[in-house]
């Protein structure tokens, strides 16, 4: 009886200690939670400042007013932050419960872009025109792919083989609209994202054996696409066609060279004067390099690294749970476009037209980046509640 009483007392003590530990986790994380939305807010604000600087001439040329692009980005930023608040305010368990509905809706939007009459940008049908503004459904699909796939991979008693089959099935359904748009870069990013989520939840075995072969097959269309091959060749040797396919890459290098350590000064850059295409979107990092120098670009990278470090700190607490997989997936879904954009600007990868997260000009991409922040905060809140329970 005494041993039983002692055991009971020990169990009660352990339970109390667990609750206290969870409480400490929550209290200790309050500053880190603030960083999860505070750092993107700093990056977003910095992006508005840079768009104001590099977008003045474009605004004057298009609308005969200097700050049109900046005002539009401020408007989108407000909408994006409000969207983040909505995503966080709705309990994340609801997003998880209906993740399949949201994922199929986003997939339907992807197929909707293929209908006649949809707007085309550089020959690609990736947008849906809603009159007042346009949306890019792939941005929505990426976010809900993280939520729905994480949920499916953590179903009770699911085997690694079955989990991998579901991952491939989800990707196959989304692959066709990407190819038909065409958005081959988006298809590759989604493949890497889904494989990354599967690896976190179930390990490397199936992705190494099957995923590698599927990944290799995806590169075959490169051999039969003159446009994509031209991009690859421009990446390999931009000076072969300095006024054509290699023009953008070379002008980006010139922007970095002009900036040096401290930059030429905010608003003083010359490359934005019709020399550097897409200075406010895809190549805004090069514009930062020219106007604020190595110091400015390093600051941007440090902010991103700090943000991922905060997510990693939470991930350590939730590793092995669906919350951990969600945090991992959301982190990858931001890291991939970040790496692809920086790699394209710095000539590490071929250019794919992916914007710099939170900084580049754009509406739907910015809104969905902030939606990720809301879902991150919501998943952590629900994860802490589940731990405490």
Image (cartoon, rainbow, N blue to C red):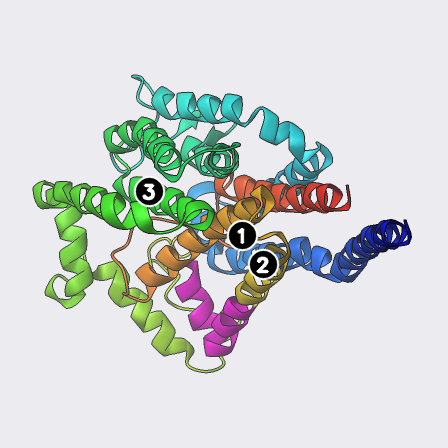
Q: Quadrant of the C terminus?
A: top right
Q: Which mark is residue 43?
A: 2
Depth check: give the residue in front, 174 or 19.
19
Q: Residue at x 32, y 26 (%)?
A: 173
The reply to whether residue 283 is visible in this rendering is: no
In the rendered image, which residue does mark 3 sit on? 191
Between marks 2 and 3, how big is the CA–CA gap?
27 Å
Between marks 1 and 3, how big is the CA–CA gap?
23 Å
Sooner in the amino-acid sequence: mark 1 or mark 2: 2
Residue 165 is left or right of residue 380, and the answer is left
Is the residue under label 3 in contact with that under label 2 (CB below 8 Å)?
no
Q: Residue 79 lies in magenta, yes or no?
A: no
Q: Main secondary structure of the magenta part?
A: helix
Q: Secondary structure at mark 2?
A: helix
The x, y position of residue 53, in whole percent, is 52, 60
The x, y position of residue 42, in whole percent, is 63, 59
The x, y position of residue 179, in whole percent, is 24, 32
Q: Which mark is residue 358?
A: 1
Sooner in the amino-acid sequence: mark 1 or mark 3: 3
First to last magenta residue range:
283-302
Q: Which mark is residue 139?
A: none
Q: Secondary structure at mark 3?
A: helix
């Amino acid at each position: 009886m005494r041993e039983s009483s002692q055991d009971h007392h020990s169990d009660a003590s352990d339970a109390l200690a667990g609750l206290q530990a969870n409480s400490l986790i929550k209290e200790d994380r309050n500053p880190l939670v603030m960083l999860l939305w505070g750092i993107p807010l700093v990056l977003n604000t910095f992006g508005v400042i840079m768009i104001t600087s590099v977008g003045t001439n474009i605004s004057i040329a298009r609308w005969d007013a200097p700050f049109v692009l900046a005002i539009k980005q401020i408007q989108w930023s407000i909408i994006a932050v409000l969207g983040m608040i909505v995503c966080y305010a709705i309990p994340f368990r609801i997003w998880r419960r209906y993740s399949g509905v949201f994922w199929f809706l986003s997939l339907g939007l992807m197929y909707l872009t293929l209908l006649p009459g949809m707007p085309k940008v550089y020959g690609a049908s990736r947008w849906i025109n809603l009159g007042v503004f346009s949306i890019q459904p792939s941005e929505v699909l990426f976010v809900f792919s993280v939520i729905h796939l994480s949920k499916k991979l953590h179903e009770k008693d699911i085997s690694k083989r079955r989990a991998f089959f579901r991952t491939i099935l989800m990707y196959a359904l989304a692959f066709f609209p990407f190819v038909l748009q065409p958005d081959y870069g988006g298809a590759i990013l989604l493949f890497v994202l889904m494989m990354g989520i599967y690896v976190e939840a179930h390990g490397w075995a199936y992705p190494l054996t099957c995923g590698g072969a599927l990944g290799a097959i995806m590169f075959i269309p490169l051999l039969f696409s003159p446009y994509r091959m031209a991009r690859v060749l421009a990446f390999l040797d931009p000076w072969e066609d300095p006024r054509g396919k290699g023009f953008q890459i070379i002008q980006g290098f010139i922007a970095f060279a002009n900036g040096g350590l401290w930059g030429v000064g905010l608003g003083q850059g010359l490359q934005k004067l019709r020399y550097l295409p897409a200075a406010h979107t895809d190549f805004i990092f090069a514009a930062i390099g020219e106007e604020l120098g190595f110091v400015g670009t390093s600051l941007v990278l440090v902010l991103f690294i700090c943000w991922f470090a905060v997510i990693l700190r939470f991930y350590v607490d939730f590793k092995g749970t669906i919350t951990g997989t969600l945090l991992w997936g959301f982190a990858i879904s931001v890291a991939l476009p970040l790496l692809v954009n920086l790699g394209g600007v710095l000539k590490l990868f071929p250019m794919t037209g992916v914007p710099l997260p939170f900084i580049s000009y754009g509406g739907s991409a910015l809104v969905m980046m902030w939606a990720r922040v809301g879902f991150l905060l919501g998943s952590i809140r629900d994860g802490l509640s589940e731990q405490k329970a």
